[in-house]
Amino acid sequence: MHTPVTWAIVIKGPLANFTRSALRFYLEQERDAHSNKTVVVFSHNTGCLSRSVLEFLQRLREQHPHRFDYSLRPPPPALGVGYRNSQREATYFGTRLAIARWAPQFVLLHRPDGGFFRLSQTTGQSTDLVSTMLRRLEMARASWPPPTSGPQQGRLAFCPTQIHLTDFYGQYHLDDYCVYGHAADVLRFATLQAPGYCRSCPASTTLLPKVLERRTGHRCQLPGPESENGQLWVRALAADDETWRPPRSTLELVLSQTVILNAYALGYVRYGNKELEEGVTFPFANTSLPAITQYSEQFGFKRRSRGTMFSLATQCIPPTSERAESLTYNCTWLSDPSLDSQILRREPAKDWDCPDPSAPSMQLKWKSACAPDRDLGDLLKREKQHADAQTRLVAAPPTAPAQTTSKREQALKRAPKSR
């Protein structure tokens, strides 16, 4: 058991070349005074096990034994439409391992095709380490209001791009690019004990009947994985607090329980499938700057357009003068009763094709990261020892994060009590 840390970064797999670069960057560049406060966990399943993956993860753990670990669990019986089950379980087991081993106060979760860094505007080189960003984020957290109600320790913070106010893709459609919050809150967000979660089913949630009526002719009649995450989170919150009333809409959930991060100001960048296949590494060189600019435009940095967009990426974007400094979006204007309700209900024309993980197109998407080997030889023996040790560790009750005490509080405790 190691000394409790402040932050754990959990990256869910698969392990693309881009993801390897992000892991190395987080671990090798963190050599300042705060590096001992940040640990990194990679989490995926054994369905993509290859010699290259195992050797890389084992070598990284040997190089950083006190700051890095990984979780490779057997895949769920069904990967789920859009890999929803495998991604959920990777999130859960990765966060659970971080809590069991290091008891972090906070967890930052993100996908394998993204990462956090900041660039110098003159040289194009990375200037801020991820711990610097986390310290900025933690200072900003002090100004966040507490959740309106419910069992959360604090609000969960989400990236904005996939938060849709319409129910067209499902209720409570939250972003899965990045999540930040108290470790226990992140763990609850991904819990496998959420009422109704079925790891052997293609999906654990359904669309509302009124939405199904409007989707006649569409290829997919299931909620998106992001919606399923939101719905299962709401069920888990309700199960942990019987007095908590589930929100009536995604907007109500966002305003009462979450904070929306300004990912641009935090230095978050995500690359698409093509760039992943071409071997783009992290952090980015000057040649990658156009892609960063393109991604910032994808976030909608043209100021909000009322009545044309349905995503919080454009509805709540800070003005140009504020976007570089403000770490969160202000979405309170959306609760204005005079606001045209059509803005909140506007539906996209784009269909969603219910991607089947077994389809050739989905297998091709991650071909460079998921090429399992049949014979791993001695590596599997080492991996079994590691997996057995993790099983014993994670099976133990989670350790609560250490409580910090100010110098004034310590002095008051030592002072003699008056009679």
Image: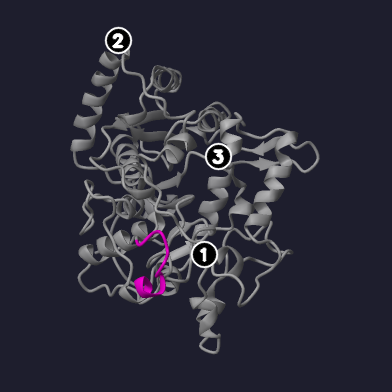
Task: Return the residue nearer the eye: 24 or 357.
Answer: 357
Query: Counting other residues with Cα less than 10 Å from the Cα at mark 3, is it few (<14), some (14-19), or many (20 or more)?
Result: few
Q: CA distance from mark 1 to mark 3?
A: 37 Å
How far apart marks 1 and 2 lie (CA) works out to 51 Å
Taking 225 as reference, is 280 left or right? right
Marks 3, 2: nearer the viewer = 3
**Contact? badges 3 and 2 (CB < 8 Å):** no
SS class, disc 3: helix
In this orientation, does residue 213 appear?
A: yes
Q: Camera-side residue: 105 or 54?
A: 54
Residue at 35% x, 49% y: name it.
81
On the question of residue 32 being in view, the answer is no
Mark 1 lies on residue:
143
Residue that mark 2 sits on: 378
Local crowd size for mark 2, using a 10 Å CA cut-off: few (<14), some (14–19), many (≥20) = few
Q: Main secondary structure of the magenta part?
A: loop
Quarter in which the N terminus is drawn? top left
What's the magenta region?
211-221
Residue drawn 46% across and 40% down? 361
Identify the amino acid type marked 3: Asn
- Farthest residue in the right direction? 122
Q: What label does residue 273 carry, if any?
A: 3
Q: Looking at numbered disc 1 in the image, what kind of residue is underneath it? A: Ser
In the rendered structure, does residue 178 fall within the stretch colored magenta? no
Closer to viewer: mark 1 or mark 3: 3
Mark 1 or mark 2, which is nearer to you? Answer: 2
